[in-house]
Amino acid sequence: MAVQGQPWRVVVKLERSAQPPSGLSFTLRYPAGLTVTNRQVGTLIPAGALPLWGEVPGGLTLAAVSAGAWPAGSGVA
C-alpha cells in the first residue's frame, strides 16, 4: 500500500510476446500531486535501444525502440 510522502516503485512487465519486440510504449497515469524522482528502464530493453521519457502532470510515458528485434520477448520494461 502506498503511503503519502514515502517512495514507491512501479514495474511494467511484458510476458509471452508472440515475437521478440523491437519497441514498446506505454503511459502510466497517477494523481497529479505525485512527483517522479527516478526513472530507469528494465532488462527487457537492450542497451542499444533508445528510451524516450515524457512527463506531464499526472502521467509518465516511456517509448523505447531499436533497429532490430530485442533478445527477449518477456521481461521488465
Image (cartoon, grey):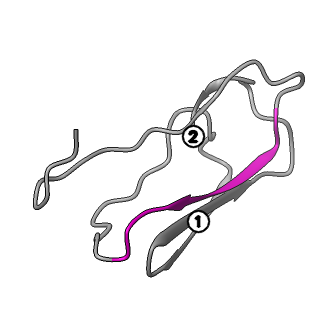
Magenta highlight range: 21-32
Q: Is residue 37 above or below residue 57?
A: above
**SS at mark 2 in the image:** loop
Crowd around label 2: few <14 · some 14–19 · many ≥20 (10 Å): some
Question: Is residue 31 a member of the stretch shown in magenta?
Answer: yes
Question: Is residue 36 a member of the stretch shown in magenta?
Answer: no
**SS at mark 1 in the image:** strand
- Residue 40 in percent (x, y) is at 42, 52
The residue labelled by disc 1 is 61
Answer with left or right where residue 18 lies relative to residue 2: right
Q: Residue at x 80, y 24 (%)?
A: 17
Q: Is residue 74 above or below residue 13?
A: above
Residue ranking furthest to the top? 16
Numbered mark located on residue 50 in the image:
none
Crowd around label 1: few <14 · some 14–19 · many ≥20 (10 Å): some
Q: Residue at x 53, y 39 (%)?
A: 12
| Figure disc tally | 2
